[in-house]
Image (tube, rainbow, N blue to C red):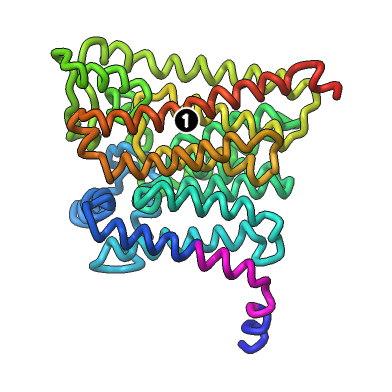
Amino acid sequence: MTTLATRLLALPKKFWFILLIALLAQLTLIWLGTASGDPFGDVRYTYAAWITSMLDHGYILGINEPWVYPFIAEIPLWLAHFVSFGDYMTGWFLVTVNLNMLTFAYLLGWGKKMERSNAAWFLIACIFLCGPVALGRFEVFSLILTVLGSIALWNKRESLSMQFFNLATWIKVAPVAAIFTGFVITNNKRKFILHLIYGTAAIVILGLLLGGNSAMFSFVGMQSGRGVQVESTIGIIWLVQILLGIPGAKIYYDNEILTFQVSGLGVTEIASLMTLVQFAALAITIFLGIRAKRKGVDTNTLFAWIFLTATLDLLIFNKVGSPQYEMWVIGAAFAGVLFGTAKWKPVLWLTIFSSGMSWLIFPIYYGYLLDGKPLGVGLLIVRNLAVVAILVWSNIQLTKLGNKKLAAQ
């Protein structure tokens, strides 16, 4: 015990200082989130109700009962339940805060990789600026896995990296951008595909062993049938119509998906096209990535720009755009900070800015947004334009990487 204490005390003071700030930032978010409003409503009501329903009825969501998320996303639900019986919120916070702290410690190599402190500070700042939603949604876990995947890639452990990203994708779809990116940058595509198949097969087999049936893939249909969410970039079209008083444009609550959506002229048709637009944007990104790969661009540099661009393709050309989706941007931007990617400062500062805007939008001025008032709509437009600016910048940089003149330098 004395030896352990001595080793802990021998760790750099900067290591402990960063962890202390990370802990204080999260505790502050919990305090602010529980002191006013109810930004943790999903945890308090929805997540806790899912656990209660499964215990009462004997089914497992996403396994033998349809669910809007892949069944792997259920693991955090049960962890929170078992950690603190009778007080689900406390259990959730114990799980999220401790896993985040372990991730920060691992990022810093348990005090031996302090050169990665800039990446840690960036992550802490963005999580805090996102507000309480950064701890109160499933995205906290997909972000952790995304960070672990980026660290594994930084350590040149490509296969392990892709398994982290694959697992994260089974919680929230955004990390699939890293899988596409991994396929582009790898020099052994056959091995990459085999490892991806092995990882996916393990997840599917686990579901089948738990009694899974067709409900294991119910999230695909339930997600594709969604309308246009109020916070999405494309939703701005109808929010502006609401501001202008155009008949038919309104915001409503979808009781099946449990989210606010917009309705109005053309919303159904545009919603049905967004998936095709996403695929087209991803195809362009992959093309630019392959083009840059052929010019011999450094692997980490290439990964950072493709991952960021593909992630923003999934976000901006999406009919869904919840406040917590800012965590997608943070996860992708983190990779570039970790790798020390050139020309990344605009991405860094725009991500920090959009994170802070996300907190203003939800929960501070969320009521103004749902009421279609200028302040709420204006904040959302500014935040979405900041994210669009990141996409434009990343496309420019990815295109430049594929230029012969640049590659020859």
Q: 391 or 40, which lies in front?
A: 391
Lateral position of residue 388 relative to residue 395, left or right: left
Quadrant in which residue 161 is drawn: top right
Residue at 26% over, 14% down = 268
- Counting from the top left corner in percent of width and height, residue 162 is at 61, 41
Quadrant in which residue 379 is drawn: top left
Q: Looking at the image, is 107 positioned above or below residue 191?
A: below
Residue 20 sits inside the magenta stretch: yes
- Counting from the top left corner in percent of width and height, residue 305 is at 64, 30
Q: Looking at the image, is 290 positioned above or below residue 10?
A: above
| Visible residue check, residue 313 | yes
- Counting from the top left corner in percent of width and height, residue 377 is at 28, 29
> Which residues are the magenta region?
8-21
- Please name the predominant secondary structure of the magenta segment in the image: helix
Residue 404 sits inside the magenta stretch: no
Q: Residue furthest left?
A: 247
Quadrant, the C terminus: top right
Which residue was labeled with disc 1?
Answer: 387
Residue at 50% over, 28% down = 312
Quadrant, the N terminus: bottom right
Q: Residue furthest front?
A: 375
- Counting from the top left corner in percent of width and height, residue 407 is at 81, 22
| Visible residue check, residue 72 | no
Amino acid type for the residue under numbered disc 1: Val
Lateral position of residue 290 relative to residue 143, left or right: right
Residue at 38% over, 44% down = 71
Lateral position of residue 332 relative to residue 90, left or right: right
